[in-house]
């Protein structure tokens, strides 16, 4: 099946710094990728839809200036958490879709100290 | 009312038991029905995918969809400790942006 690679799997950063998370589709081209956030024992909450070559579409309540998304190629989308704060600590997951299925990255555990 | 309701559990069963996991939904526009398995601190992986009412079987897993009742189920036969994980249902309409259930934590003890 299709593979989506997400990196890094874990990151610890200091409050006020920025963190970049990469999401790659390894064996297919993804014009659209999705970024989710998941709190412990909670479901995946869609943050934004990343579109290759255009601006991302953010869900209501998600700060676009804080969560910068770049989708520069058909196989790579990045999420940058800017000026991170402890409340940004969470599990971030990317997803890429084919015509009929969604495939997920391994997730990134972000801890802001 | 949430679009997708799923009991978070935890559901604890002995090894070898038949497990039944369920979701209900309210949006009749949902056309695609998926079940994902998520191990702790990992991304979800697709287990089953269907788009019609009825049953779909894959090994020990059976997905069941009842569109008239807006109810979907995942059955696991001969459950194993390695099946211990969180199981999320996901539903989508034509645009294919899935709406996830909260996930049910399953514990299979030896």
Image (cartoon, rainbow, N blue to C red):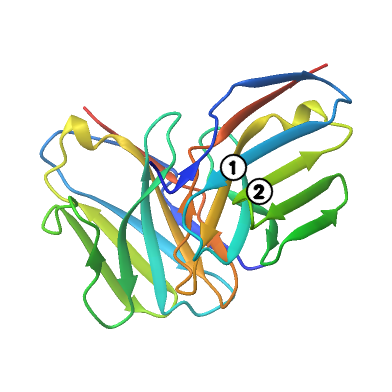
Taking the spot 61% from the left edge, 58% from the top edge, the residue there is B33
| Inter-mark Cα distance, 2 to 1 | 5 Å
Give the chain of mark 1: B
User: Element at badge 1?
Assistant: strand
Residue at image location 37% in from the left, 51% down from the top: A36
Nearer-the-camera pick, B27 or A48: B27
* First in residue order: circle 2 vs circle 1: 1
Q: For the view shown, which residue lies furthest in the front direction?
A: B68
Position of A44 compared to A5: left or right? left
Tell me the tag on residue B72.
2
Q: What residue do we see at 50% from left, 55% from top?
A: A105
Query: In this image, B54 relative to A62: left or right?
Result: right
Disc 2 vs disc 1: Cβ atoms closer than 8 Å? yes
**Quadrant of the image for the N terminus of chain A?**
bottom right
Q: Chain of mark 2?
A: B
The residue at which mark 1 appears reads as B23
Q: Residue at x 68, y 36 (%)?
A: B21
Query: Taking the image as drawn, is residue A5 in sight?
Result: yes
Relative to B82, is A68 above or below?
below
Identify whether A6 is placed above or below A74: above
In the picture, the quarter occupied by the C terminus of chain A is: top left
- Between B1 and A30, the residue placed more toward the observer is B1
Q: Position of residue B89 (x, y in %)?
A: 58, 47
**B6 sits left or right of A81 in the view:** right
Q: Taking the image as drawn, is residue A11 in sight?
A: no
Where is A92 relative to A25, above or below? above
Q: Are marks 2 and 1 on the same chain?
A: yes
Q: Position of residue A39 (x, y in %)?
A: 37, 34
Q: Position of residue B50 (x, y in %)?
A: 69, 63
Query: Whole-percent x and y of residue B60?
Result: 86, 44
Give the class, few, some or many, for how many residues have Cα within 10 Å of label 2's Cα (few <14, many ≥20).
Answer: many
The 10 Å Cα crowd at callout 1, few under 14, some 14 to 19, many 20 or more, is: many
């Amino acid at each position: 099946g299709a593979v989506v690679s997400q990196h890094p799997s874990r990151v610890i950063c200091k409050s006020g710094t920025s963190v970049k998370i990469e999401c790659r589709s390894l064996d297919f081209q993804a014009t659209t990728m999705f970024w989710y956030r998941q709190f412990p024992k909670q479901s995946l909450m869609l943050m934004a839809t990343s579109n290759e070559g255009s601006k991302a579409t953010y869900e209501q309540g998600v700060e676009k200036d804080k969560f910068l998304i770049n989708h520069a190629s058909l196989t790579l989308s990045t999420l940058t958490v800017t000026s991170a704060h402890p409340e940004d600590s969470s599990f971030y997951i990317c997803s890429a879709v084919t015509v009929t299925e969604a495939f997920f990255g391994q997730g990134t555990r972000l801890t802001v100290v | 009312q949430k679009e997708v309701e799923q009991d978070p559990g935890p559901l604890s069963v002995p090894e070898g038991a038949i497990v039944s996991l369920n979701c209900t939904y309210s949006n009749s526009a949902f056309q695609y029905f998926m079940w994902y398995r998520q191990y702790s601190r990992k991304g979800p992986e697709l287990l089953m995918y269907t788009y019609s009412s009825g049953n779909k079987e894959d090994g020990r897993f059976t997905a069941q969809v009842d569109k008239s009742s807006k109810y979907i189920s995942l059955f696991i036969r001969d459950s194993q400790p390695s099946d211990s994980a969180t199981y999320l249902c996901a539903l989508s309409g034509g645009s294919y942006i899935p709406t996830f259930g909260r996930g049910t934590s399953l514990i299979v003890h030896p």
